[in-house]
Amino acid sequence: MAAAEVLSKGRRPGLARLLLIAVALLFLGLFLVMPLLVVFVQALAKGIGAYLVAISDPLAWTAIRLTLYVAAIAVPCNLLFGVAAAWAIAKFEFRGKSTLITLIDLPFAVSPVIAGLVFVLLFGSHGWFGGYLRMHHIRVIFAVPGIVLATIFVTFPFIARELIPVMQAQGKDDEETARSLGASGWQTFWHVTLPNIRWGLMYGVLLCNARAMGEFGAVSVVSGHIRGLTNTMPLHVEILYNEYNYTAAFAVASLLALLALLTLAGKSFLEWRQPELKHAARQVRDRTRRVNT
Amino acid sequence: MSIALRGIAKKFGEFAAVKDIDLDVPTGALIALLGPSGCGKTTLLRIIAGLETPDQGQVLFDGRDATLWPIRDRNVGFVFQHYALFRHMSVFENVAFGLKVKPRRERPAGAEIRKKVHSLLELVQLDGAGDRYPAQLSGGQRQRVALARALAVDPAVLLLDEPFGALDSQVRHELRRWLRRLHDELHFTSIFVTHDQQEAIELADTIVVLNRGRIEQFGVPGEVYDLPTSAFAHRFLGQVNELPVQLRDGRAFLGPVDISPAAALRTDANYIALIRPHEIEIGPEASGWPAAVVAVRVIGPIVRLELCAEGRPVNEPMEAEISRERYEGEHFSVGQKVGLRFRRWQVYPANGAVA
C-alpha cells in the first residue's frame, strides 16, 4: 500500500521501479553471478584437458567420495530427526517446547568453527571421551566419524525448520480424523502426514544436502586435512588453492558449484511442481480468513 | 450407543474449559451443545471422541467406562468444521480411507469397498464425483464428503464440531435438513457443537446450553426457548429486550405496565425483565406504555419495529416483531405513537441468576 502510494505520487511512476530492479540486478550480478562465472572460467582457463586431468586426480576422487559418503549419512539422520522434531513441535503440547525450538536453531547461531572445536573437546585425544575412545581404538577426531558428526551438527536445523511452519499451518485435524477412522499411528503418518508435508520435506532435504556437501568450517577443524583420507571437497579445494594449483582448485570448486546449481534447479522444479503446495497455502489462508471474520 | 458423562472436568493450564459436567445422551438422540465461544462445548465433544482426556470424571459408552479408550477403539465418527479432507486423495479415496486402514482380517475386499463407497457417495448425493479432488469441490460438497467418510466405518456415534460453520446460510439450511433426514434414517447417536441457536433449534432433539464450562440448561428446543431458566440462556437462545424493573409499593413495573409476579420480589435488589420481540403487544397509544415507532423493517414474513418507549433512552429502542399480515392491515409508520403491553416476560435479578 505505502509503496504503491509513493509510486503513484511520483512524477514518473516507472522510474522508482526501474531503479529498484536495476539495483537488484546489479547486486545480483556482482555478488552472485560473477563469482559463479569466475569459478567456471578459472576451472577451464587451461583448456578442457587440464580440467579433466584435475578432476580425475585420485585425491580429488577420494575427496568427492568422502563428501558424498558424509552427506549420505548426515542427510538421512537429519531427515529422521527433523521430521520427529517438527512432528513433536507442531502436533503436541509439552513442557520445554520453546526451549526445543531455540535449541534447533543453535547450529545456525553458533559459528561452525566453534561447533568443530566442541567435537574436538569432546572426542579429541585430550577430550572428555578421549581416553575411552583410545582404549577401544576408535578414532573420531581427524577421522571420518568426526566429519560426519560435525556435518550433522551444522545441518541439524534445515529440515526441522522447513517442516515446523508447514506442519503447524496444517494443524492436527487431518491426523485426528485419520485416527478416528481407525488408522494406526504409523498408517496416519504414512498415508496422511507424509503426503501433506512431502514438498516441504524434499525442499528441506535439498537444502540440508547442499549444506552438508559444502560445509567447511566445522569439518575443517575436525578433519585434520589428511589427504586421501579425511579431505572433503571444500577442504581439498582449499589445499589446492594454497598450493597455487589454481586450475585444479577451481576445477573441484566447479564440481561443488555444479552440485549447488543442481540443488537450486531441483528446488525450482519443486516450486514449479507444487500446485498442491500452492493449494495448501491457499487453504491455510482461507482458514485464517474465516477464523478472523 | 448411549453416552453418559459423569463429573467431567478439564483444565488447559489455569483455564478450566469444562467443570463437573454430567450428561446423558440416549441411543439415537440428536443433541446440540450450544454456547458462545469459550464455553467448553468443543472440549466436551473432543472428550467424548477421545481426542482429549478429562482431568476428572468418566465417559461411559453403553454403561462401560470408555474414559481412557483411544479414539480408534471408540467407534465414533468425527467431523470437523473445516472438513479435514485428505487433499492428496480423491473423494473416493477419502471415503474409502477408514475401510482401507482396517487390519487385514477385518478389511473388506476391494470390490466390497468400492460398492460401499459408491453407496455412501450416493447417500450424500455426490455419486459421480468420486474421481474429483477436495480442491475441486464447493464447501457444502466437501462437508458431505467428510460425512460420508465418517459414516464409512459404521460409527455408532457421530460427533460434529460446528459442522456448518464455514458455509453460507443457504447451503447450511439445506445441509441441516439433509443431516436430520440422514440421522432419522440411520439411527446413530449424534452430538453436534454449534454457537448458532437457530441451528440448534432447527436440528436437535435436545439442546444443552453451556456457559463457562457448565451446563446452563438442558431440554427440548421449544422448552429451552420458551422457558429459559437463566438470563444467560434467555439471551443466548434468541433476540431479547432487556428492561430494568421498577419496584413501587411492593409491585413491579415496566414503565406504567404492572408485571408483578406471583412471588414477591425483594425490594433491596435490582431486577431486569427479558422480553422476546414477538412477546411485545402493540396497541393504541392509550392502551399501554406510550411509545413511538422509530424504524420499520420488513423481513420476509415478519416485520420488525423499533420502538422508543416513554422514559427510555432514545438510543436503546425496543425491538418488536409482528406478522406481515398485521403490518399490511395496520401499516405502522415511523413517528407513529403506539401503546405497549407484554404478552410474556421473565424477571431475573440484575446479576444474572434466576428470580
Image (spheres, coloured by chain):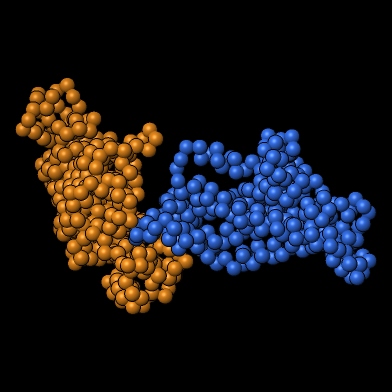
Chain colours: A blue, B orange
Residue at 57 percent across and 66 percent down: it is: A274
Residue at 67 percent across and 47 percent down: it is: A149
Residue at 24 percent across and 57 percent down: it is: B157
Q: Residue furthest left?
A: B262
* Image quarter of the C terminus of chain B: top left
Q: Position of residue A3 (x, y in %)?
A: 65, 51
Asked whether B123 or A49 is in front, the reply is: A49
Residue B264 occupies quadrant: top left
Q: Position of residue B4 (x, y in %)?
A: 20, 47
Residue at 45 percent across and 52 percent down: it is: A171
* Apparent side of residue B21 relative to residue B127 in the rendered image (left or right): left
Residue B268 occupies quadrant: top left
* Apparent side of residue B345 relative to residue B100 in the rendered image (left or right): left
Q: Position of residue B7 (x, y in %)?
A: 23, 38
Asked whether B104 or A93 is in front, the reply is: B104
* Apparent side of residue B330 relative to residue B308 in the rendered image (left or right): left
Vertical arrangement, residue A253 with respect to residue A153, above or below? below
Q: Position of residue A165 (x, y in %)?
A: 54, 51
* Apparent side of residue B351 relative to residue B88 in the rendered image (left or right): left
The answer to whether residue A167 is seen in the rendering is yes
